[in-house]
C-alpha cells in the first residue's frame, strides 16, 4: 500500500506544516504528489487561519526530485502528454513561490532536482549541516527547466552555469554561500531554529507580509525609473491607509502587541 505523500497540520498559532512522508522513495515526486501538494497549497493560501507555511520532510532525504517510476512512465508519453505533465510541476513551483503567506523550508537531508526547486521557492530556507544538494538532471539527459527561474533567482546565473551543467553534489555550506539557503545549523538544531523563525514571522502583520512579498517580485531587476518610483509610492500609500497599518502603529506607540501578534 502506498504511504501518504505528506502530512498537513495547522497549529493553534496559525502555522501550517507540510511534511513529506514518502520515505521509501526519498520523498520523490510523482504526478499524484504534485497534484495533491498543489491543492494543499491552494487551500492553505485561502484559509484565513493560516499565517505561515513550513515545508519539511521525514526520513533521510528532503526530496530526491522525480520518482524513477514516474520518469519511466513519462518516457513513454508523447509530446502533448509530457507538456501537460510538465505544466503541472511548473504550476506547483509557481504556487509555492508566490504563496501569499510566508514559507519556510527545513532541509534535513539531500535535496535533488525538483527538491532543490522546492527549497528555492520558499521565502526562507534553513539546512542541517549534513544536508546536500544536487541539480542532477543532465546526468539523466534532462534539464532543470521548470525549477530554473527560482533556482537561478536564488543562486545567480554564474553558479547555475556550473551546477546545471556539472550536476555536482554540493554541501549545505556551499548552498549557504550561493544563497540557496539562509542558514546552516547543526542537525539537532534544525527544528529549534525553525521554531524561532516562525515566531519572528508571527510578529509581522499578515497583510503587510503578503504585500511585502509582492513588492519584492515587483521591484526585482527593475531600474528605479519614474514608473517604479510611482509604483512603490502607491504601494506604501495604500498600505498606510489600511486598518492593519493603523493597528501596528498604534500598538507601537502604546507599547503593546498588535492584534495579530497576541498569543
Image (cartoon, rainbow, N blue to C red):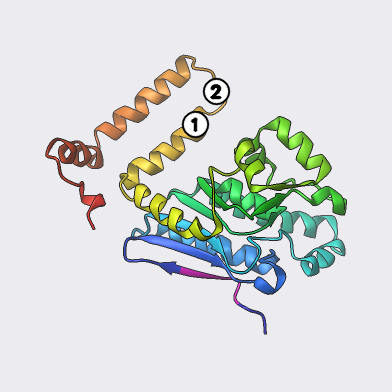
Q: The N terminus is located in which quarter? A: bottom right
Residue at the spot 47% in from the left edge and 19% down from the top edge: 227
Q: Position of residue 164 (x, y in %)?
A: 78, 41
Q: Which residues are magenta?
A: 4-8
Q: Answer with left or right where residue 27 lies relative to residue 212.
A: right
Q: Main secondary structure of the magenta part?
A: strand
Residue at the spot 62% in from the left edge and 37% down from the top edge: 177
Residue at the spot 72% in from the left edge and 34% down from the top edge: 159
Residue 104, numbered label: none
For label 2, the residue is 222
Q: Answer with left or right where residue 244 lies relative to residue 224.
A: left
State the residue lying farthest toward the top.
Answer: 226
For label 1, the residue is 218
In the picture shown, does residue 114 fall above or below 74?
above
In the picture shown, does residue 215 fall above or below 76?
above
Asked if marks 2 and 1 touch (Cβ < 8 Å), the reply is yes
Amino acid at each position: 500500500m502506498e504511504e501518504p505523500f505528506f502530512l498537513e497540520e495547522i497549529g493553534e498559532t496559525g502555522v501550517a506544516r507540510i511534511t513529506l512522508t514518502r520515505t521509501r522513495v526519498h520523498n520523490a515526486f510523482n504526478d499524484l504528489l504534485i497534484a495533491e501538494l498543489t491543492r494543499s497549497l491552494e487551500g492553505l493560501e485561502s484559509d484565513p487561519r493560516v499565517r505561515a507555511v513550513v515545508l519539511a520532510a521525514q526520513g533521510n532525504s528532503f526530496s530526491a526530485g522525480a520518482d524513477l517510476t514516474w520518469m519511466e512512465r513519462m518516457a513513454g508519453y508523447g509530446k502533448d502528454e509530457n507538456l501537460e505533465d510538465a505544466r503541472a510541476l511548473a504550476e506547483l513551483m509557481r504556487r509555492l513561490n508566490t504563496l501569499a503567506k510566508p514559507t519556510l523550508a527545513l532541509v534535513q537531508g539531500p535535496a535533488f532536482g525538483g527538491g532543490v526547486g522546492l527549497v528555492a521557492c520558499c521565502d526562507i530556507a534553513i539546512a542541517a549541516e549534513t544536508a546536500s544538494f544536487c541539480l542532477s538532471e543532465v546526468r539523466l539527459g534532462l534539464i532543470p527547466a521548470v525549477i530554473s527561474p527560482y533556482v537561478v533567482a536564488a543562486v545567480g546565473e554564474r553558479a547555475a552555469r556550473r551546477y546545471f551543467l556539472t550536476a555536482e553534489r554540493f554541501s549545505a555550506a556551499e548552498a549557504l554561500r550561493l544563497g540557496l539557503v539562509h542558514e546552516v545549523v547543526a542537525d539537532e538544531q534544525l527544528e529549534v531554529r525553525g521554531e524561532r523563525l516562525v515566531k519572528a514571522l508571527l510578529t509581522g502583520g499578515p497583510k503587510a507580509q503578503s504585500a511585502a512579498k509582492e513588492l519584492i517580485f515587483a521591484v526585482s531587476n527593475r531600474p528605479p525609473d519614474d514608473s517604479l518610483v510611482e509604483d512603490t509610492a502607491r504601494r506604501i500609500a495604500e498600505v498606510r491607509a489600511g486598518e492593519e497599518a493603523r493597528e501596528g502603529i498604534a500598538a507601537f506607540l502604546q507599547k503593546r502587541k498588535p492584534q495579530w501578534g497576541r498569543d
